[in-house]
Image (spheres, rainbow, N blue to C red):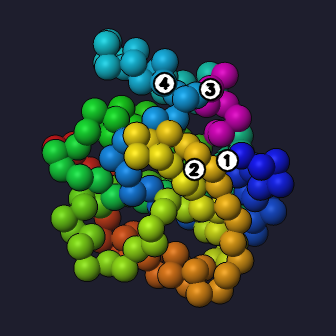
């Protein structure tokens, strides 16, 4: 990934109002969490300690943004029955919520008539997009920044439509 792409931490630090993240894949093969995912598959145990070395930087980042008045929301569109990866993700989402994120889940069948972008994204302050690109097996292959107004409008409208239909994390039952 080119070093010219700002990190989520950089973008969150510059954010003043809102940071929204839409995830649309049923599996992510992110190398940094591969060992923990395998451990969860084997034992059912997942790191939910907000002070752990893996979580503390994210918790600090989000809680600092929320303290500044930034609303941080994450929505996940998922197929049901859910994959093992989504079960793993659901089990650890308690830390995202602890940090100050609002998280909702939308069963894919309820998203059929929502115009959606082709890739996952973060949208900061309704105008700056950080696209996330993944391979077919879920490996992260890169990011791209866009300030295209039409793309930002699509992302904002898609996220809002998903959010309106999605189920809050504490109410979503894994199927």
Query: Is any part of residue 97 visible from this angle?
Result: no
In the image: residue 30, left or right of residue 81: right
From the image, tell me which residue sits under label 1. Answer: 63
User: Alpha carbon of mark 3 to alpha carbon of mark 2: how far?
Assistant: 17 Å
Residue at 64%, 69% in the rendered image: 129
Secondary structure at numbered mark 1: helix
From the image, tell me which residue sits under label 3. Answer: 54
Asked if disc 3 and disc 2 are in contact, CB closer than 8 Å, the reply is no
- For label 4, the crowd category at 10 Å Cα-Cα, with few meaning under 14, some 14 to 19 and many 20 or more, is few
Asked if disc 1 and disc 2 are in contact, CB closer than 8 Å, the reply is yes
Q: Which residues are magenta?
A: 53-59
Q: Which mark is residue 155?
A: none
Query: Residue 150 occupies which quadrant of the picture?
Result: bottom right
Residue 19 in the image, given as x and y percentages of width and height: 62, 64
User: Alpha carbon of mark 2 to alpha carbon of mark 4: how far?
Assistant: 25 Å
Residue 79 in the image, given as x and y percentages of width and height: 23, 52
* For residue 5, above or below residue 81: below
Residue at 55%, 62% in the rendered image: 121
Secondary structure at numbered mark 3: loop
Q: Nearer the viewer, residue 175 or 37?
A: 37
């Amino acid at each position: 990934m080119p070093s010219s792409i700002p990190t989520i931490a950089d973008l969150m630090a510059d954010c003043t109002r809102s940071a929204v993240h839409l995830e649309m894949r049923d599996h992510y093969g992110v190398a940094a969490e591969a060992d923990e995912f395998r451990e969860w598959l084997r034992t059912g145990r997942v790191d939910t300690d907000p002070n752990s070395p893996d979580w503390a930087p994210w918790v600090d980042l989000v809680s600092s943004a929320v303290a500044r008045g930034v609303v941080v929301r994450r929505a996940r569109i998922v197929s049901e029955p859910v994959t093992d990866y989504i079960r793993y993700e659901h089990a650890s989402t308690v830390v995202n919520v602890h940090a100050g994120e609002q998280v909702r889940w939308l069963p894919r069948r309820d998203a059929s008539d929502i115009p959606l972008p082709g890739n996952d994204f973060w949208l900061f302050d309704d105008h700056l997009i950080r696209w996330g690109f993944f391979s077919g097996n879920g490996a992260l292959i890169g990011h791209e920044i866009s300030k295209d107004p039409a793309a930002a409008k699509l992302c904002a409208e898609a996220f809002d439509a998903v959010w309106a239909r999605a189920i809050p994390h504490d109410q979503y039952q894994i199927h």
